[in-house]
Amino acid sequence: MNRMKPRNLLWSLIFGGLLLPQLASATLFLRISGSELSAVQDMGVKNLVFGWPIPDVSAVGKVQAQGYQVFFEAPPGDLSAAAETAEKMNITGVILAMENVDGPGDNELFRRVTSAHPRLSFLLLNPGGKEPQMRGRLVVERNGILQVSSPTSQPWVDTNLALVKLARAFRPDVTPLYSFHWDLSDALRNKLGPAAEDYCLAISEANAFHADVIVDLHEKLQQGLLGKESSAWAVWNNVKRYIAFEHSESAAGKLRPLANTGVVMDTMAPSYEGLNLMARHNIPFVVLRPGDLKPKLLESFDALVIFSAPSSAAVTALGDFAMRGGIVVLVNLRGQFPWHSLEPAHKNKQATAYDVGAGQVVELAEPVIDPEAFSRDLRRLMGFQRMTLGLWNSLTSVAVADLQDSNGETIVNLVNYALEAEPVQVQIKGHFSSIRYESPDGGCCQYLTPVQRGPFTEFVIPALFIQGEVHLRR
Amino acid sequence: MHWRRTYPIVVFLIASVSSPILCAQTEPPVYKKRYIMGTVFEVVVYGLPADRASAAIDKALGEAVRLDHVMSNYKDDSDLSRMNRTAHFQSTEIPPDLYRVIEESLPYSRLSDGRFDISVGPLVDLWKAAMQGGLMPTAEQEARARDCVGYQKIKLIPPNRIEFHSACMRLDLGSIGKGYAVDGMAEILRAQGVRSAYINAGGSTMYGIGTPPGKKGWAVHLRDPSGSLNPEVMLTDNSLSTSEQTAGSALGGVSPGHIVLPTTGKPLQTQYAVNVVARSATESDALSTTLLLVGPEKGAVVIKGRKDVAAMWISKDGERTVADNGVQTFRENRTGVQTDSNSAGTNIPGSPNQK
């Protein structure tokens, strides 16, 4: 069951023939609360976001005069008004805060407004962004805690990777944009604001996932920077190293995702947590629409997870895919399928598995109830040989691998949500002779020693703190 | 006997309303977390000014980091890793903490007839690879790994030396190390003047110092694989640990489980989760694994006569067995109303009732 189809490796590497390559660049937007800010060159950021309605119009004028590019962030109902004001004030653009990840809702209104204001940039803000962090389990209250015991748990990581992948599936030609608000429920954090590392993590995450992000600049920090407080500038100078890393040389190219798992869905709701946990478990996947289930595209994959009812043509394609050695997991989909004529290889309350040709079809009888177990099981089902990317010693890191169009390099971006420097062992499919490592803290460049193990190359990043970028050449 | 477990239990936490009167009387709690020993260590301190509480927590978490450098089997340069490379048939000096935690582990091996064994590492590694999608171990590999296991082959030479009487022995403190670290943290917090605090090491070992403001203890909901009993315990200057075997695969793949029985060389087959309350976290941590490995019947014998120790085994179908030496420790809350532990099963002090 663990046979790796050699052509899949090739397809994985050139994957994207039917999907658009994505820009590697990521843009940082700062959402500010006060009316003034330090100079653009000191901040290292040029895009500012003001929530609509604008409480203080003069503040917008001031930062514009400083050379900042200003965007208004508006909900769908205020899109027209925000655009008109933006036009009058010579604002750079409008960010539409969408209610669903699959589009602006009222497409007609969006089309009308955008065509009425051709000078303005219109960006789509995906809902559901969250503060990237390694989460604890305690709920702390003023007079006690809430806690449930368990076996030792893997740290829970809040990552925006699934959201970015979803957004890219719905609008492949647009760089995904998301946002979040800092969790300031803790009294100490509310008073002091997020630490430098928290800003760095948010910036690193967006950079690693090739997405744009809006980050709130905490009022205390904003005031401190304006007041030239050394502690505030110590924080921001740290952050600026990560902003500068975002604009490094590798961000200019176009990338194609390295992924051997396809997730087929037409709606976000029932499957999002499953996706989230697949991202968390470093299962390299892309999100596909049901119409993508065509034999040629499926050759790119080793596994398919199906959340949307397949058409009869797609069912045939899935059967053929399994015959050739692929793994198909159907989640909570009822119907008569050709493989039902076979004796199940395994059957229990939750799942029925069929050996189909060289591959396997597993039908889950229920939606994904435990996404953590689902992702772990999927990884196990795919087996060692089919894993394209694996991390050891790093339960808190997420890795994303891409192929760079311009020079054939494979680039692995890693983000460590624990904010603790840890050695991380990486295993990637393929043989690479040169491995270059860069990070915002260590700069460029460190050459790591590749070790070939079967079809894989292994290497160790000595200390991954928040972000690292690895360039692999054959 | 644990390794770094690669799954969290989905936790449902329901926020409750805090008393405005109490809020006015107390300092806001200070909470911090840090990634240590492959999981999240969390500390919350009440009743101290924020800067003092914050400094105390930093010191406590720093202690756990220090002990990780002593006991980690993931770090090549830890004292444990060094010992695992050098102590075969030669007496090797080790730091006091490492000596102490190994010394504290050995009685549990004797109590459990070798089921609890800190030398089980080679077997665990073998099955861990299978769990992560690798091949299942062959009988030959299994036999080879079993040859490396056996607490009787560990020789401690007071005050600070150790020798392995095996060429391939490798110790893994995963089943006791977190508890030892939590005890160290509690000691530091107390030394810093903390009188009300809660320490959580990855959800599996926790310790309550004093009580939270206005409460009788730190109420902790216990792991209940049946989801029907909702048992809880109040911690007050004592510790709780939980152990459970990895859940099976829903997709039909092989899921051997992360807790390996040294006496058979294979992953433990059990339907239980075990919750253990004890005075120290070292004890609760080691006992929770021990009691999972030996089961309720033999577990009652292990518990009998141990002061301030209680254990509850809960099966997937809601059967529960309690051993508590006559001191009612656990409470159950089936419908939101707290009842005593006898309401859901016979509670025989020192002798569990396996329903």
Image (cartoon, coloured by chain):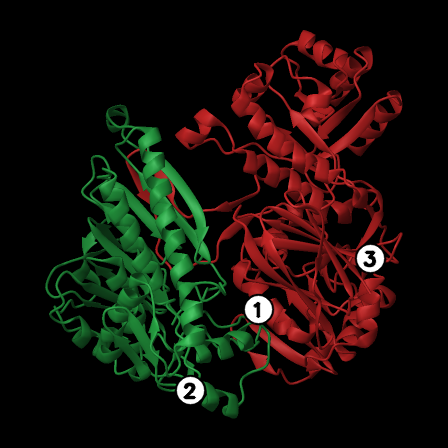
Chain colours: A red, B green
**Residue at left offset 76%, top offset 46%:** A168
Residue occupied by mark 1: A377
Which mark lies nearer to you, 1 or 3?
A: 3
Q: Marks 2 and 3: same chain?
A: no
Q: Which amino acid, by three-letter code, is at mark 1? A: Asp
Badge 2 crowding class, 10 Å Cα cut-off, few under 14, some 14 to 19, many 20 or more, is many
Chain of residue at mark 1:
A
Q: On screen, A260 above or below A165?
A: below
**In whole angstroms, how far apart are the C-alphas of marks 2 and 3?**
44 Å
Q: On screen, A154 above or below A77?
A: below
Q: Which amino acid, by three-letter code, is at mark 2? A: Arg
Q: On screen, B94 above or below B47?
A: below
Q: Marks 2 and 1: same chain?
A: no
In the depicted view, which residue is nearer to us: B201 or A285? B201
In the depicted view, which residue is nearer to us: A243 or B100? B100
**Residue at left offset 78%, top offset 73%:** A321
